[in-house]
Image: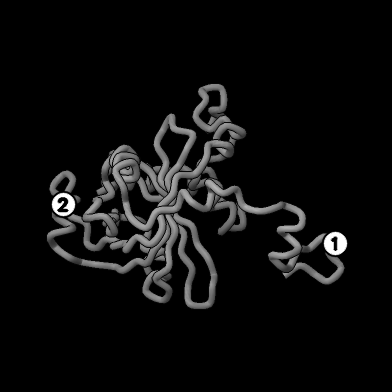
Amino acid sequence: MPSPATAGIIDSEEMLREIMGETMEIAVTKCCAKLDSHARDFISRSPFLCIGTANAWGRSDLSPRGDAPGFVQVLDDNRLYIPDRPGNNRLDTMTNIIENPNVGLLFMVPGFNDTLRVNGRAWITCDAALAGGSQIKGRVPKVGILIEVAEVFLHCAKAFIRSGLWKPESLQDRNEMPSLAHMILDQTQAAPTPLDIEEADEVIEENYRNELY
C-alpha cells in the first residue's frame, strides 16, 4: 500500500465516482450472461488471449495464451476450453485456479481495435475428449482450462487507437534491446559471459523450434 504521505490516494468508490462520474448506460447493458453469435465469431477469429487469475490471498497474475485462430473451443453457450501448451512449468495460472477459480479473459484479433472480455470460473481438466479436439502435430495437451462463463462483453477500441498497436509504424526494432536470454541472465547472474548468453539464446531457440506443442 502507498505510504500515508502519498498524496491523492482514492480509497472509496464514492471518491472515485465524484471524480470520474457515473458509468455510461451502454457499458452496463452490453454485458451478456452467455456467448452469443458475435462472441463466438470473435473467439473463432482470435489467436491470442490474456488470462487473469489470483491465488487464495489475492496475489494476481496475467498470462498470455496463443495459437492458431479458433484454438479456444466453444463448448456451448456458457463453457470454453483453453488447451495448455508446453511452457516452463511455473504453472502460475493453473495453481491460482486451483486455489481461486475466478478468472478474466481478454481476447484479441490482429487488426481489430476492439476486444472481447469474458469473466467466469475455471477448472483444470485432463478430459481426454476435450484434449483430443486440440491435438496439433500429433501432440495432445496434457491438461486444459475449462471456463464456465458468467459475463461476456465487447470492449471499445480506445486503448488500441491510442497505442497504435496494429499500425506498421508502431513496430519497434527488437534488436534495440538485448535478447530474452541475455536479459534473464543479467537479472539472475552477476556477470554473464558472451558464451553464457550465446548458449542460453540457443537453448531458447531450440525450445521454440521443438517444444511449441
The residue depicted at 51 percent of the width and 23 percent of the height is 168
* Residue 129 left/right relative to 78: left
Of the pair 74 and 85, the residue shown nearer to us: 74
Residue 147 in view: yes
- Residue 112: x percent and y percent? 44, 32
> Where, quadrant-wise, is the N terminus in this rendering?
bottom right
Rendered view: 121 above or below 24: below
Q: Nearer the viewer, residue 15 or 9?
A: 15
Residue 98 horizontal/vertical position (percent) = 37, 74
The local secondary structure at tag 1 comes to: loop
Is disc 2 surrounded by few (<14), some (14 to 19) or many (20+) residues within 10 Å? some
Real-space Cα separation, disc 1 to disc 2, in angstroms? 53 Å
> In this figure, which residue is indicated by the disc labeled 1?
7
Q: Earlier in the sequence, mark 1 or mark 2?
A: 1
Say which mark, if any, is on residue 133: 2
Q: Secondary structure at mark 2?
A: loop
Instruction: Report whether residue 206 is seen.
Output: no
- Tell me residue 146's x, y (percent): 28, 62
Q: Is residue 127 left or right of residue 174?
A: left
Going by the numbered disc 1, the residue's amino acid type is Ala
Q: x and y percent of residue 87 in the render?
A: 35, 55
Q: Is residue 107 left or right of residue 189?
A: left
* Amino acid at circle 2: Gly
Circle 1/circle 2 CB separation < 8 Å:
no
